[in-house]
Image (cartoon, rainbow, N blue to C red):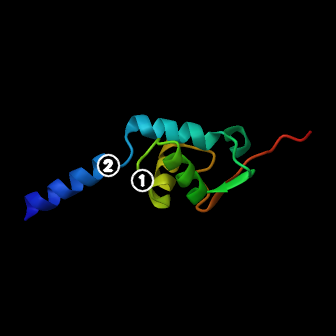
Amino acid sequence: MLERASARWSRRRTLGSSDLGDSEILHVAELPPYELGLPYGRRSLQQLCDHLIARRVVKHLSREHLRRILKKGGSACSGSSASCSVMTPSG
């Protein structure tokens, strides 16, 4: 029984992000949404998750796991549990 649970846990871990994926996630999170061609200046964690999945950085990603990655990586967005605002260019 324990082996079965352990195998399920290890399989679940490999389906998520890796350290290489984490660095890509942090890179995308630091970019303002308008530089990625997104139509907003403030994005939610769910919008960031959706964008990362669409770009195929990860196969799937929960908001909570994304929040943990951002917090661990020291992202400017990590203090927020719901959204990240960035300065938009005026002009």
| Residue at 59% from the left image edge and 44% from the top image edge | 29
Q: Quadrant of residue 62?
A: bottom left
> Identity of the amino acid at label 2?
Leu
Q: In which quadrant is the N terminus drawn?
A: bottom left
Q: Position of residue 43 (x, y in %)?
A: 67, 55
Proximity of marks 2 and 1: CB atoms separated by less than 8 Å: yes
90, 75: nearer the viewer: 90
| Residue at 61% from the left image edge and 62% from the top image edge | 82
Q: Which mark is residue 76?
A: none
Q: Residues within 10 Å of mark 2 (few under 14, many from 20)?
A: few
Helix or strand or loop: what does disc 2 sit on? helix
> Identity of the amino acid at label 1?
His
| Residue at 39% from the left image edge and 37% from the top image edge | 19
Q: Position of residue 39 (x, y in %)?
A: 74, 50
Q: Position of residue 52 (x, y in %)?
A: 52, 46
Q: Residues within 10 Å of mark 1 (few under 14, many from 20)?
A: some
For disc 1, the marked residue is 60
What is the C-alpha distance between the residues marked 2 and 1?
8 Å
| Residue at 63% from the left image edge and 40% from the top image edge | 30
Q: Which mark is residue 15?
A: 2
54, 57: nearer the viewer: 54
